[in-house]
Image (cartoon, rainbow, N blue to C red):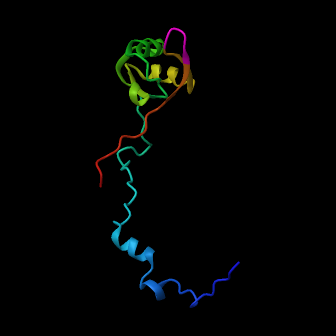
Amino acid sequence: SRRRRSRSPPVRGRERRGASRDSRRRARSPPPREKRSHDHRAFPDGYVERRRIFVGGVPKVTTEERFRAYFAQFGEIDKLELSAARSFGFVSYVDAESVERALEKRMHQFNHTAYNSTFIEVRRPKAPRGPPS
């Protein structure tokens, strides 16, 4: 085996390239975005929707009829929004007591077809996002 002889000692960092690669990369990248803080001054006690629930983990094959039939057991439904392709939905009830009955359990076993069931998450919706600042 032959040994290689180094011609000169290795030169690192700025001595070799001028400026470091990281500093050049930072110069080209946009400044980091500030975290958006949602303005909750309108809700001093926290944001609470009294007649609406969020439902997560909805199977993609769920029909609006089955979704409505399941959540109608808790009370009269005012409005139903289902986005099964994105696996979530919202249910608005006529009265707040219906929401409380639905929220007694966080995980519900939902029969999305005649023979299949899965667990879905039921909770209060998060505060709506305001316009970007």
Q: Could you tell me residue 67's position as x and y percent? A: 43, 16
Question: Residue pushed farthest bottom?
Answer: 8
Q: Main secondary structure of the magenta part?
A: loop
- Measuring 40% from the left and 16% from the top, which residue is drawn there? 63
Q: Quadrant of residue 129?
A: top left
Residue lying at the far top of the rendered structure = 114
Q: Is residue 47 above or below residue 51?
A: below
> Residue 84: x percent and y percent?
40, 25
| Residue 24 as seen in the image, left or right of residue 11 | left
User: Can residue 125 be seen in this snapshot?
Assistant: yes
Q: Picture coordinates of residue 19 (x, y %)?
A: 42, 82
Closer to us: 41 or 87? 87
Q: Quarter of the image for the C terminus: give it.
A: bottom left
Q: How many marks?
A: 0
Q: Is residue 100 magenta?
A: no
Question: Which residue is pictured at 39% across the width and 12% down the height?
Answer: 65
Say whether residue 51 is visible: no
User: Residue at horizontal 37%, vertical 60%?
Assistant: 33
- The answer to whether 53 is drawn above or below residue 15 in the figure is above
Residue at 41% across, 14% down: 68
Task: State which quarter of the image contains the N terminus.
Answer: bottom right
The segment highlighted magenta reads 113-117
Q: Residue 116: say if magenta.
A: yes
Farthest residue toward the front? 1
Question: Where's residue 108, x and y in %?
Answer: 55, 21
Which is more toward the observer, 90 or 12? 12
